[in-house]
Each structure stands twice: as C-alpha cells, then as structure tokens.
Image (spheres, rainbow, N blue to C red):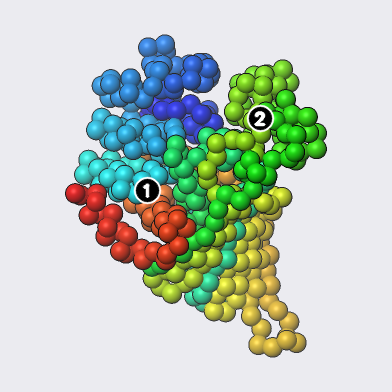
Amino acid sequence: MKLALIGAGQRGMIYSEYACFKKGIEIMAVAEPDEKRRQIAAEKFSIKEERQYPDAEAFFGEEKLCDAVIISTMDKDHFRQAMAALEKGYDILLEKPISPDPKECLHICEEAEKRGRSITVCHVLRYTDFFSTIKRILDSGELGRIVAIQHNENVGNYHIAHSFVRGNWRRSDTSSPIIIQKSCHDMDILAWFAGSEAKKVSSFGSLSHFKEENAPAGSAARCLDCAVAEQCHYNAVRAYLPVRGSWPASVLTPDQTEEGIMEALKTGPYGRCVYRCDNTVCDHQVTIIEFKNGVHASFTLSGFTDRVCRTMKIMCEQGEIRAEDDGNIVEITKFSSNAVDPVEKKVIRTAVPRAGHGGGDALLMEDFIGNFENDSAESRTAIKNSIESHIMAYAAEQSRLTGETVDVDELKEKLMKECHA
C-alpha cells in the first residue's frame, strides 16, 4: 500500500506518521501550498522532489500514483479534492467535516458508491476505548433502553481562543460553523449511541465574549504591543510560550524555540488580541435532538470551561452512565427499588490512550489500513455512516440562525432534491 498526503498540517502529519513509522507504509507524495510544511513532510517521509506538489490540483493533474490519499486540508477544500481523488480512482481517508455543505457531503458519498471507492471519515471518537466501552454497555441491554442523553463538549477557554478565535476555524464563511467543524464528532457519537436517525433538532447559541466591545481598556490589536497584556487571561505569550514544542504552540511555527514563537506572535495570526480578531463562530451553543426511536439528547459545546474534555450522562430504563473522557472514567449505576437498599455501582477505567484523541487516531489508521487490505471489510466510520452527523450539525446551525425547530426528514428531502437538481 502507498499513500499520498494532501495537506501537511498537524492532523495529516499525525495520520501519515502512524502509517509510515508504525505500519511501514510508504508516503510517496505530498501536496501542500505552505513551502515549510511541504519541506518538513518531504524530509520526514523521504519523498522524492518530483513528488512534492505545491497544491492538490498539481497532484491530481498526474496519473494515479498510489493506492489512497489522506485529505487533511481546510473544510471548504474537501469537496473539490475528494471528487478529484475519486475521479482518479483513489480510496480516501478524509478529515472531518466531510464538507461544510451537506449537499456536497451527499455528492461525495454518492460518487464514492458509484465508483466503488471507499472513504473513511476521521470520526476518531468511535475508535477510542472510552466511547467504545460505553457503546458496548448500551448495546448489552443491561441498563434497558436509552431514554435520554446529556452530553457536554468542554472546548476549553484556551482551545477556543486558539482554534476558533485566532485560528483557522474562526469564521463560518471560510471554514464552517463550529458545530459542524468541531462537534460533528459529537453528533456522530450521539447518533451512534442512540442507534437511530434524528427526527427533530433545535439549537441556540451565539458569539458572546470574543468581540471588540469586551476588550480591556487600553488593549491593543496584538498582544506584544498591548499595555495591559500582563493582566489579560488570553495573553498570547502566556498561552503559547510555556507549551512550546507541543500543541497548540506547535501550530504557530516549525521553529519551536523561544525566538521562533515570539516571531510568530509578532507577525502571525496567533499573536492577535482575541477581542479584535475577525472571528464569527459561536463561543457557546446548546442543541436539543429528538431521535426517531424516542431517545432525546441535549448537547452543549462551550469555550467557557477550564478543562478540554467531554462529559456525559446517559439515562436508561434500569440505570444510568456517567462518564468523562478526561480521566477515562465510566461509572455505571443500576437503580435500586428504594432509598435504603444498597446501590449497585461499577466504575470502569478505560485504557490509557496510546495516541491522540484518546487513542482514536491510531485505531482509525489501523481500521483504514486493515480495511484496504481486506476488500470485504467496511470502516467503522465509512462515509455512509458519517453523513447523519453532518446533517444533524447542519440542522442545528439552521435552527440557531432561524429560531425554528428543524424537521430532519424534511431537511434531507430538500437537500436531496437540491443535490440532484
């Protein structure tokens, strides 16, 4: 098996490094507009000069060169690049979201089916031991049927400032709304746990804090020029310098010396005041979902949390599950008949992650590579299994903007008509 890397950002490099250094797979081409990133990938994977492309168009302009491609570019590029890859006959590992446009998601899925190609979507949470353990408990029936789910995505104050205020995913018009970009993961988990398609979706949220009217008095456009930076919680120097060499500082520049970080803060987007960026996405959003099988779910994403983690409470007919992925803890409680009988409770500590995203990155790659080697297998996150999460996230954003509850079947019918118009 041979792979090509389309987009040599952090996520694409993680997948490629696992394939190359853990599985012995050749990364034989890279397409990346950023020259430094392209050079780093070329050196790391010993890619020949003639297989180093300045953009995806140049790569897809060649005849088919390998077995599959890893597409890890900006959200709005996915459709064009995935369709080009399918036309050339490549199988695809596709970073989420499939596309910010649900019609494009449907187009890609149909094209893959028509051409007999496989697309694995990087919904890495399904592969983690944490979420897989919860799914096994629910499917066992030991707690009866699911009645309701409460799910929180605690984005974390420094994470939202980095990725969704200063970073690449700060604007809906250039990437995608935060619930599509960040939380299609969570929509996927909710649909997976509920074992049902969504029926109705309502959502509320806004950009409430990271805007100019909340900037401290005397602050400046950039942290290094700011007279009140030392008193600001979101001071970029404080955010990045102590963690240089690791995320999120590693995103700023390949030069992870103190001098390199300071230069990036002086000239790059991550040195800007969080109250004076051009960000448009929500910093908090609440979504209510009714599934067709009667399960109800509430989902909250928020940047106003101390930790970066996911927490859940799943209420079933005969017991409940409380879980948090930060500590890999799943607590199962079976109901007692009264207030004096002992409660049957069990705590499971799931496996300590051996790679990013709770171990999901590594297991995603194992699945992707294993399924390529076994033509009869289907990925746990094959594109046809991932479409529902994107429709749910899109419905949530439409509800937030219009103030109306979205009937998901009506939305799907409308999208399919537009898709085939």
Query: Does 339 sit above or below residue 349?
Result: below
Q: Is residue 265 visible?
A: yes
Query: Does 75 sit above or below residue 48?
Result: below
Name the amino acid, label 1: Ala
Q: Secondary structure at mark 1?
A: loop
What is the quadrant of residue 349 in the picture?
A: bottom right
Q: Which mark is residue 221?
A: 2
- Residue at which label 1 appears: 382
Q: Is residue 363 visible?
A: no
Indicate left or right for 416 with 9 as reference: left
For the point 44% across and 16% down, which residue is it? 47
Q: Closest to the observer: 231 or 243?
A: 231
Residue 269 position within the rendered picture, expressed as x and y whole percent measured from the top left? 59, 28
Indicate left or right for 101 with 212 as reference: left
Give how far apart the Cα atoms at labels 2 and 1 are: 44 Å
Name the amino acid, label 2: Ala
Residue 2 position within the rendered picture, expressed as x and y whole percent measured from the top left? 38, 27
